[in-house]
Image: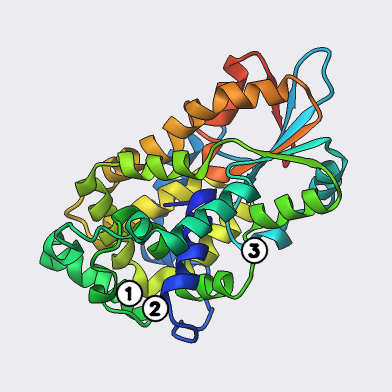
Amino acid sequence: MWTHKIRAALAGAAVALLFPAGAFATCIGTNLIPDLRADDPAAVDAMYARAAQVPNGEGRFWKVERTGLPPSYLLGSFHAAEAIDTIDDRIWETFSDAAHVVVEVDLDQQAAMEARMATDVEFSFDLEGPGLSARLDPAQEQAVSDALAVRGMALSDVDKMRPWLLASLLSFPACHLQAMATGAQPMDTAMAQAALERGTSLSGLESYEAAVSAFRRVGPDVLLESIATTGDLADREEDLFRTNLELYADGQIAVIAELGILLGERTTPGIDHRKLSEDVLAEILDARNVAWMPGLTQILSGGDAFVIVGALHLPGDAGLVSLLRREGFTVTRLDK
C-alpha cells in the first residue's frame, strides 16, 4: 500500500498533466471485510491477529510529551479528501491551538515538484530506456493494462513513465485522481493550508526530492511487481479504498497493511506478498522515518507542535511512535 503524502502530491500533479478529464470511473465502493469474512473467516481472523501483534498498530492520534515542555501531538493521516470528515472536534481543537504544524512535504515543496513535473520531461519519463512494456511479463502487462483501462488509458500512453510515478498514480482509484485534478485537496494538504491561513508556522520533514528518492531506492524489479499487484486489484480499487478509509477512521492502522497482503495472496497466490510489501515499505516508510528523526526531535523539543504524517508511518518497531519513545519522549494514544 502506497499510503503517504508524496504519492498524493505526485498523483495530483501528474493526473492534471497526463489524464484526460471525464475518463474516470464513477466513485463507488463498499467495505470488503464482511464479504471476506463470509468467504474465509479464518483468513480474516488471522489478518486481525497479525495486525494485533504490530507495536502501536492501533491509533491515529497521539500526545508527545517530555518533562518541562508543552505537549505536542502526532496525527496519522489518510491521503484523500474524504478523510477530513473522519476528524473529530478534539483533534481539530488541538490542531487549531498548536503553535507549529509539521507535514511530510510542505506546500512550497509540493508547488516546486508540480512545477518541475510541468517543465522537466525527464523527471517523469525515461525517454532513453526500454519502456515498461519491455520490462513487464505478460501477466504483469495485463494487470497494469487493466488498471490503466479504468483510467481511460493504454499501456502505450505511459510506456516511458518512470515506474515510481506510475506506482503513485495506480495507488489511487481513478475517481479520486480525477477529484485531485479538479482541485480536491488530500487531508494533509487541506490541513496545511488551514494552518497557513490562520497564520500558524508550517514546515515539512523532507524535500520532494528526498521523498521521490525513497521510491527510486526500491529495487526496479520489486517496484514493477508492486505496480502489477496493484493492477491486479483494479476491479476492486474503489472497494479497497473505502475499506481502508473505514479502517483508518476506526484507528485500525496495522490492519490496512495486512489487508493489502491478504488480498494480494488471494489474487495472485504465486507471489510472496508479505516480502514484497516489506521490501517496498522498508524504503518508503521505515527509511524515511529514520531520516526524519533529527528534524522531528528538534521540532518536538520546542513543544506545542502538531505533526501530520501518513498513518502507516506510525506503527511498528521502525514506526515514529517507537522511534520517538527511544528518544525519550512519552507518546500516548489519545483516540481510544
Is residue 41 shown above or below 330?
below
**Do we see residue 311 in this rendering?**
yes
Tag 2: amino acid:
Arg
User: Helix or strand or loop: what does disc 2 sit on?
Assistant: loop
Q: Is residue 260 left or right of residue 248?
A: left
Q: In the rendering, at what x and y percent does residue 32 appear? A: 47, 66
Label 2 crowd (10 A; few <14 / some 14-19 / many >=20): many
Label 1 crowd (10 A; few <14 / some 14-19 / many >=20): many
Q: Whole-Å distance between the Cαs marked 3 and 1?
A: 23 Å
Q: Which residue is mark 2?
A: 151
Name the foreground residue: 253 vs 92.
Answer: 92
Q: Is residue 332 left or right of residue 287?
A: right
User: Which label was assigned to residue 148?
Assistant: 1
**Residue pictured at 58% horizontal, 74% vertical:** 179
Tag 3: amino acid:
Gln
Dividing the picture into quadrants, the one containing residue 247 is bottom right
Tag 1: amino acid:
Leu
User: Which label was assigned to residue 3?
Assistant: none
Q: Whole-Å distance between the Cαs marked 1 and 2?
A: 5 Å
Name the foreground residue: 109 vs 218.
Answer: 109
Label 1–label 2 contact, CB within 8 A: yes
Looking at the rendered image, the quarter that the C terminus falls into is top right
Is residue 154 shown above or below 192?
below
User: Helix or strand or loop: what does disc 1 sit on?
Assistant: helix
Q: Which residue is mark 3?
A: 185
- Residue extending farthest bottom: 22
Q: Whole-Å distance between the Cαs marked 3 and 2?
A: 20 Å
